[in-house]
Amino acid sequence: MNIHEYQAKELLREYGVRVPPGRVAHTVDNAATAAEELGGERWVVKAQIHAGGRGKGGGIRVAGSIDEVRHCADQLIGRHLVTPQTGAAGRLVQRVLVERACRIHKEFYLGLVIDRGTQRITVIASEAGGMDIEEVAARHPGRIVREAVDPAVGLMDFQCRKIAAKIGLTGRQIPEATKLMQALYRCFRDNDALLAEINPLAVVDEGQLMALDAKMSFDGNALYRREQITAMRDFDEEDPKEVEATGHGLNYIALDGDVGCIVNGAGLAMATMDAISFHGGKPANFLDVGGGASPEKVENAFRIVLQDPSVRIILVNIFAGINRCDWIAEGLVQAMRDLKIGVPIVVRLAGTNVDAGRAILAASAFPFIMADNLDDAATRVMATLRAAPA
Ligand code: ADP
Ligand code: MG
């Protein structure tokens, strides 16, 4: 789960990371008031969306007067911002962060990630700040410093000093950077983060270190024990189909193919997607209805999969253990009756109550395409797609 820059900065501030004074604003008037309250002579008005590269897309604007703050906010709020990370449609800006503008002397990159190879939280730093770290990694791999943290002792002073020196910090900036990195580490660890990125970390004004941007992402599976983080969730930034699926207890991930998948179990869902790909198709989604799926749950699964206009066919693949094929079949028939399903449906049922399930489908008079096994199902999907007009 991702959060907005202003939320990440509030959280980091609590842990002792220095960030510029700032206020979030949802309207142009609020933005002007925010700037007045912050004081100073120059402000930065920053579009808050869950995508980076905002600077390049015109989403970060500098204002030298309250009127200019107003103008900048007006240019951003309520409009779609296109950045290198949003895709062509862009993202609707619903709020801006108004911040005191700092005089920047130098920009650095500082990030924390979980390195799955070493299974450790790893600090990544670079003196090439402001740039995408992917770009730095590709073009100047030598300019990236990495340091893995031993979870038993945490991020040690000597490691921070080493990182700070390697990216070119000197003098009192080194103990300052040490404090900042350790604060960032605590914030990361204590909130089950997956990513924390400060780009840029900047030397500003009188030489102090400041986090000018902040991006954080958290482990969705740990949200149950992270109330403060859960409260920061912005559903407007997420795929509405995925949000609805979560509400129905379904695991749904949207993908970009045209074969809708309704499957029980994450492993079988992956195998189903593999089988479709193996036969030359592209799955439109991952969907795990889970164990003990009621007919209602199955119908909801259809409703969600069908919201994706690129779906041209649906493959239902159920291997019932805890599930019951007769319930799944009832759900299928119910979905056919209640929803206007204009696409063919291939069904593979196996396991508990399979004969009862098949009987329900056969008695329904809806044109389900029945398959004997997963390979047969994927073959039938592709044959049906090829026979249908595109
Ligand atoms: P993004 O990474 O989405 O482009 P940033 O928050 O990193 O957005 O802002 C882009 C650039 O704008 C930064 O690299 C920095 O140079 C400048 N900037 C951001 N916030 C401030 C600020 N408070 N004061 C001065 N400059 C800023
Ligand atoms: Mg940035």
Image (spheres, rainbow, N blue to C red):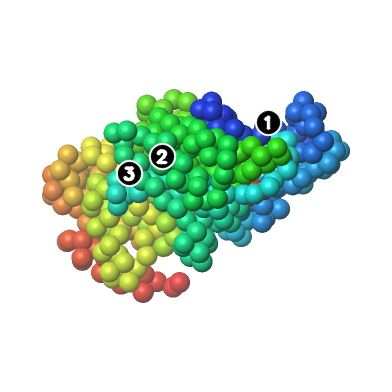
- Give the residue drawn at x 55%, y 35%: 176
Q: Secondary structure at mark 2?
A: helix
What is the number of the mark on residue 367?
none
Amino acid on which disc 3 is placed = Arg
Q: Residue furthest front?
A: 171
Q: Earlier in the sequence, mark 3 or mark 2?
A: 3
Which is nearer the eye, 40 or 281? 40
Question: Position of 3 compared to 383: left or right?
Answer: right
Label 3 beta carbon within 8 A of ligand 2: no
Q: Which corner quadrant holds the N terminus?
A: top left
Q: Position of residue 245 (x, y in %)?
A: 40, 41
Crowd band around label 3 with a 10 angstrom C-alpha radius: few (<14), some (14–19), many (20+): some
Amino acid on which disc 2 is placed = Phe
Give the residue number, with chain letter if any, for mark 1: 21
Q: Earlier in the sequence, mark 1 or mark 2?
A: 1
Q: Secondary structure at mark 3?
A: strand
Question: Position of 354 compared to 178: left or right?
Answer: left
Amino acid on which disc 1 is placed = Pro
Give the residue number, with chain letter if any, for mark 2: 158
What is the number of the mark on residue 120?
3
